[in-house]
Every structure is written in structure tokens, then in C-alpha cells.
Amino acid sequence: MTDIHVSPEDDTALQDALDAAQPGTVISLKKGRYLHPVTLRRSGTADAPIIIEGGAGNEALMDGLRTVSDLPRGRPDPDAFSFFTIENARHVVVRKLTFTNCL
């Protein structure tokens, strides 16, 4: 099992960690606000899922910096408003994260 610790001060660290994840990887997010949308395209396995987690008390805040007034008229493009995308991946566990201002 590999542990990767991510800090919100590094703009690309979370995406880099997601890109490097392999089955059994635990990505631990340190306390703070994460402001950049990310995409996970890797899978874990049933016996070794990829785990993305915040600390005790849900101190990792995923902040999309969006409000309802940011929505375009008509049907919005979900790709333009997704903060955390899990794409074609299986056996992924996301826990102890808080999301705000994500549409």
C-alpha cells in the first residue's frame, strides 16, 4: 500500500496524486481548501481500492467557488461545473471530504 499526502498549498498536488494512484494507494488530504477541479481515471481492485480521504472532522474542503448565479441559461455543461470527477474508474473510496460551492 502506498500513502500519498497532499497539501492544498500545492496547486497540482492532488491531480498529480490521482494520476499516480495504483490499487491500494491511500491519498490523504491535509486540512485546508482545495480549489482546483480534478479527475481520477485510475481504478483500484476489490481487494485494494484507491482511497481518497480527508482527516478527522472532514477538514479537507473541496471548494468549487461557484454559485447558482454562475450557471448559464439553459442546460449547463457538466464538464464545466464538475469539481471532482471519477471517470471510468472502479473500486474507489472517497471519505471524510466536504464539498462546497460545487454545482
Image (spheres, rainbow, N blue to C red):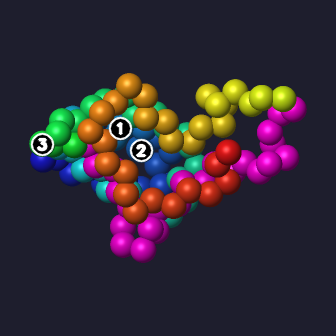
Front label number (1 vs 3)? 3
Amino acid type indicated by mark 1 = Leu
Amino acid type indicated by mark 3 = Asp
Residue at the image point whose x is 58% and y is 49% from the top: 35
Sequence-wise first label, 1 or 3: 1
Horizontal side, residue 78 vs residue 34: left or right: right
Whole-number angstrom distance, CA of label 1 to CA of label 3: 19 Å
Residue at the image point whose x is 67% and y is 45% from the top: 103
Whole-number angstrom distance, CA of label 1 to CA of label 2: 6 Å
Q: Is 31 inside the magenta-drawn segment?
A: no
Instruction: State the residue position of label 2.
Output: 14
Vertical order, 13 against 40 (above or below): below
Q: Label 1: state its secondary structure.
A: helix
* Res. 47 image quadrant: top left
Instruction: Report the magenta residues as a range.
Output: 50-73
Crowding at dot 2, Cα within 10 Å, few <14 / some 14-19 / many 20+, comes out as: many
Q: Are marks 1 and 2 in contact (CB under 8 Å)?
A: yes
Crowding at dot 1, Cα within 10 Å, few <14 / some 14-19 / many 20+, comes out as: many
Instruction: State the residue position of label 1.
Output: 18
Using the image, tell me which numbered label, if any, was put on residue 66.
none
The location of residue 87, given as percent across then percent down, is 43, 28
Instruction: State the residue position of label 3.
Output: 47
Nearer to the camera, 99 or 36: 99
